[in-house]
DNA sequence: AACTCCACCAACCGCAGCTAT
DNA sequence: TATAGCTGCGGTTGGTGGAGT
């Protein structure tokens, strides 16, 4: 079947934006606001496709963008968030006000990857490089992620680290969550003290379990796909794109922090009023 | 001065997810 | 339920400028 192209390529400019194009785009968005990117170019008198306009605005023209070098604190925050979220650049960007996913992605690929490698840490797995390569050669241990039902989460923060595993088992279930934790060798200061703005509290349960326990309350059929935020446990309201289907109900009953009450990954759902960044910042783009 | 190499980053592309019909 | 359209995301590319030879 295929999809129609997002724009008529023959009549659109590509490549670097000119000053005049920037000014037109800024003026139009100031007057009419963001959104409806497909029709925006024509309305704004730009020979660009909507995608290009959106990207230009989000990554370069938006007034709330922070230009300039990344600070050491931002570096470490990105590393920690990446160890938790992987290449979810938009989510990572949501925790760094004024930074865009594209900017962070570029910065990661050009600076942080090298920085981690110099520290002896595999930038993909966030494990010490020797262990990371060794684990690829050998069979996984009991606590390694051997099935799709096992989740492995790693934290890292210091060049010299020792590692240990923690596992969370679920009563009556064979699945377990394995956590590879990096403990700093010299500095015992917990991550939370170094980065008070980074809430690393995790509450994790198996999605299937949650749905069963909740009786699929308000989430439609069991085959309904979750949005990514929902799968991360951001289920307490507006942050969830499928909220109409489930989150209001489930989130509304989610008091306390035990596993049976669902997710609160990164503490985003509960911390909206108290953390430095409300969840809306995740949607700032 | 001329050339090559490399790092950086803006922009593009394809795809997935969501929504409307 | 199926289909089409739109938006957003993440991987990749290509242009540019600085450093090195």
Image: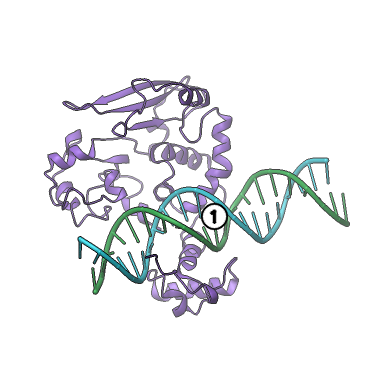
Chain colours: A purple, B green, C cyan
The part of the image, by quadrant, that contains residue A268 is: top left
Using the rendered image of the protein, determine whether residue A262 is visible from the camera's viewpoint.
Answer: no
Figure check: A205 above or below C12? above
Residue at image point 52% right, 43% down: A108
The part of the image, by quadrant, that contains residue A21 is: bottom right
Q: Secondary structure at mark 1?
A: loop
Q: Quadrant of the N terminus of chain A?
A: bottom left
Q: How many marks?
A: 1
Using the rendered image of the protein, determine whether residue A240 is visible from the camera's viewpoint.
Answer: yes
Q: Is residue A73 left or right of residue C4?
A: right
Q: Nearer the viewer, residue A268 or A50?
A: A50
Residue at image point 58% right, 44% down: A110
Q: Is residue A237 left or right of residue A183?
A: left
Q: Chain of mark 1?
A: A
Percent of width and height locating residue A186: 48, 19
Q: Is residue B3 left or right of residue A166?
A: right
Residue at image point 48% right, 37% down: A76
Percent of width and height locating residue A136: 47, 26
Percent of width and height locating residue A231: 28, 45
């Amino acid at each position: 079947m295929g999809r129609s192209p997002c724009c008529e390529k023959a009549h659109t400019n590509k490549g670097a934006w000119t000053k005049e194009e920037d000014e037109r785009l800024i003026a139009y968005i100031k007057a009419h606001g963001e959104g409806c990117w497909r029709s925006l170019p024509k309305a704004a008198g730009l020979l660009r496709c909507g995608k290009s306009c959106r990207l230009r605005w989000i990554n370069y023209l938006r007034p709330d963008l922070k230009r300039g070098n990344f600070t050491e604190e931002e570096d470490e925050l990105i590393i920690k968030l990446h160890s938790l979220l992987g290449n979810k650049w938009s989510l990572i960007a949501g925790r760094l006000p004024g930074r865009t996913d594209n900017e962070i992605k570029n910065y990661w690929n050009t600076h942080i990857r090298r920085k981690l490698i110099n520290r002896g840490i595999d930038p993909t797995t966030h494990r010490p490089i020797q262990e990371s390569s060794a684990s690829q050669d050998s069979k996984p241990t009991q606590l390694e992620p051997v099935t799709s039902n096992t989740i492995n989460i790693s934290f890292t923060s210091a060049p010299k680290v020792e590692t240990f595993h923690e596992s969370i088992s679920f009563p009556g279930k064979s699945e377990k969550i394995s956590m590879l934790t990096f403990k700093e060798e010299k500095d015992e200061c917990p991550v939370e003290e170094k980065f008070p703005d980074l809430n690393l509290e995790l509450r994790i349960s198996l999605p299937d379990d949650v749905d069963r326990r909740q009786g699929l309350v308000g989430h439609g059929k069991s085959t309904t796909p979750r949005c990514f935020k929902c799968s991360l446990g951001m289920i307490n309201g507006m942050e969830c794109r499928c909220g109409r289907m489930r989150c209001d109900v489930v989130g509304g009953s989610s008091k306390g922090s035990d596993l049976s009450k669902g997710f609160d990954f990164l503490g985003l759902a509960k911390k909206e009023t108290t953390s430095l960044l409300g969840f809306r910042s995740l949607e700032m783009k």
